[in-house]
Each structure stands twice: as C-alpha cells, then as structure tokens.
Image (cartoon, rainbow, N blue to C red):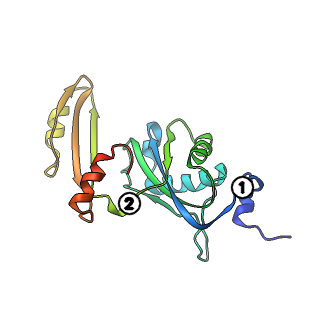
Amino acid sequence: MLPETKESLIFGADELAAYPLLPAPITVRFRFSKTGSLQYISHLDLQRTFGRVVLRAGIPVWYTKGFNPHPKLVFALPLPVGTESVTEYLDLRVDREMDPSEMMTRFNSCLTDEMKILDAYLPEHPFSEIAFAEYEIDLRSAGIGAREALSSCDVSSSSKNSSSSPSGVSWRVSRINSPKISSSSSSSAASRSSRV
C-alpha cells in the first residue's frame, strides 16, 4: 500500500495537480465575516474549522516542514467569544498558482451563510505592521439601562462617540495594538478602509 500524502487526502487532489507549483510559497489574505451563532465559537475552534475547510475546498495550501505538517493559518486580531464581525482577516500561504478569486469561490462553497469570505487578495503589508484597530460596538438591549451599562465600562483609551438608537447604544472605539508602525506608514494604513 502506498503511503498517504497530504495532497492525496484533499478533495479533488487530481484537479489540484493541474495548477503549477510556485518557486516559493506566497501569502494570500482573506477578509471574512463571522456572524450569527458562529460568534460563539472560540478562536481555536475557528482555526480548526478553517483547517478543515481548506482541505475540503481544495485550496493549494503550503504545509509546515516539521514532524507533523499542518497548514499555517495566521489571523489578524482574534475576537473574543460572543463577538460578531464582518471584517476579519486570515493569511494563508499557498504553494500552487491559483487566482485569489477562485480560492474565494472554493472557500465560500464549503462555508455557511454565517461565515463567508468577502475578499481575497495578495497583501501589501504583514499583520505585524497593524498599529491600531477601530471597532464599532452596537449594544442591543431592551432599552433598560443600556446607556448606564455602557458608561460604566472602562474605555479610557477610547473615543466615546455615543449615539442613541432605537435598539440601544452605539459607540465607536479605537484601540492601539502595536507601536511598530511609523507615523508616515500609519497615515497610509488609515486610508485603506476595507483592506489591511
């Protein structure tokens, strides 16, 4: 019996062999959403899910060269459990020549409506250059004490732009994550609204 390789376990491995190998692996960045009941899965479960979806979708992923090879998945800023997001980022290294839009189509065919790939592209900067993140928080409650509960939160490094809405209170919060980026780079990073 022949030994199994990672490529032989991939759904459509014969189809994947039609794509030429790259001289060196490249990184493809995916912007995705995680909403609905999937907000309750942890970051580790999200990693396991994407690892399985990569195999199911037939993405030409690059595997680490250690004793137990695995695909390298790098997420930008992990979300806490119970938080929905429509702009999350994942970097994936691939070793075959495949268009990012085709990868996005393959991913979405294996994902639910609550988790969808919204964009796929070759990144200009690594995640390590992220200097800040801006969050828009929408608290929905029965209207009883929503403003009081939010004003009691510790948001000392945040910009409090509160506005009342029929469903509750909405605030915009900015948080500094890393001082690694220079001031000239941060202005260009701030101008990119949907891509990191």
Does residue 150 show up? Answer: yes
Residue sitting at x 50%, y 47%: 120
Question: How many neighbours does mark 1 have within 10 angstroms: few (below 14), some (14-19), or many (20 or more)?
Answer: some
Expressed as whole percent of the image width and height from the top left, the position of residue 192 reads 33, 46
Q: Secondary structure at mark 2?
A: helix
Q: Which residue is mark 2?
A: 127
Q: Is residue 118 above or below residue 45?
A: above
Q: Is residue 10 above or below residue 169?
A: below
Q: Quadrant of the N terminus?
A: bottom right
Q: Is residue 77 above or below residue 142?
A: below
Question: How many neighbours does mark 2 have within 10 angstroms: few (below 14), some (14-19), or many (20 or more)?
Answer: some
- In the image, 159: left or right of 107? left
First reached walking from the N terminus: tag 2 or tag 1 = 1
Expressed as whole percent of the image width and height from the top left, the position of residue 124 reads 41, 57
- In the image, 31: left or right of 146? right
Expressed as whole percent of the image width and height from the top left, the position of residue 19 reads 70, 56
Residue sitting at x 43%, y 51%: 89
Nearest the viewer among 89 and 125 is 125
Q: Which disc number belongs to residue 16?
A: 1
Q: Amino acid at mark 2?
A: Phe
Residue at the far right: name it.
1
Q: Amino acid at mark 1?
A: Leu
Q: Quick check: marks 2 and 1 in contact, CB under 8 Å?
A: no
Q: Secondary structure at mark 1?
A: helix
Expressed as whole percent of the image width and height from the top left, the position of residue 100 reads 56, 49
